[in-house]
Image (cartoon, rainbow, N blue to C red):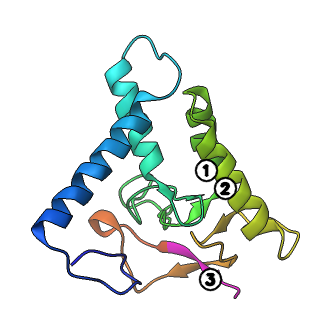
Amino acid sequence: MLGYADAPRRAVGVRRADALLRATRTAWETWSSRGDDIGTGRAHVRRSALVLRGLMYDESGALVAAPTTSLPETIGGERNWDYRYTWHRDAALTVLALFRLGHADEGVRYMRFLLHECVSGSGRLRPMAGIRGEQEGAEVVLDHLEGYAGSRPCCAGTSTR
């Protein structure tokens, strides 16, 4: 079955799945081949750009901070954030890197997300938002959860919607 976690899934045959796989690969290869000449370390820089692009939620243009959640800055340390959200400071750095590599479209999409979803409702920008534009409220400590290698506490935002 193929589909998003929150959308109805549908069965596809082997031929359709193969066609989808080829189309996906072509799209990523096309995206990767665009952009400015990188110079030294070209393969590594392109791979890094692909990872950054993979952090974008296509439905909204949001950029998640990391593909993982609750990895602490240091094992056992207090800074153990939920990185599945758009943290605007981190997203700005991602956009800057993509702009420098010649991928301005992603920066424009994120800016639309930022202005439409995050600022237009309240007129105020919070440090983080959900990938669909949900405005996050205060930071909360989730004492009942532990992060990587037992690190505590886990921290997340609470929705204000």
Q: Which residue is mark 1?
A: 91
Quadrant housing residue 95: top right
Residue at 36 percent across and 67 percent down: it is 151
- Label 3 to label 2, Cα distance in Å? 16 Å
Quadrant housing residue 67: bottom left
Most extreme residue toward the top is 40
Residues at circles 2 and 1 in contact by the CB criterion of under 8 Å? yes
| Left or right of 15, for residue 44 | right
Residues at circles 1 and 3 in contact by the CB criterion of under 8 Å? no
Give the image location of residue 75, x and y in percent. Answer: 35, 56
Q: Which residue is mark 3?
A: 158
Q: Which residue is mark 2?
A: 88
Frontmost residue, 159 versus 55 = 55
| Left or right of 107, for residue 48 | left
User: Most prominent secondary structure in the magenta stretch?
Assistant: strand
Mark 3, mark 2: which one is toward the viewer? 2
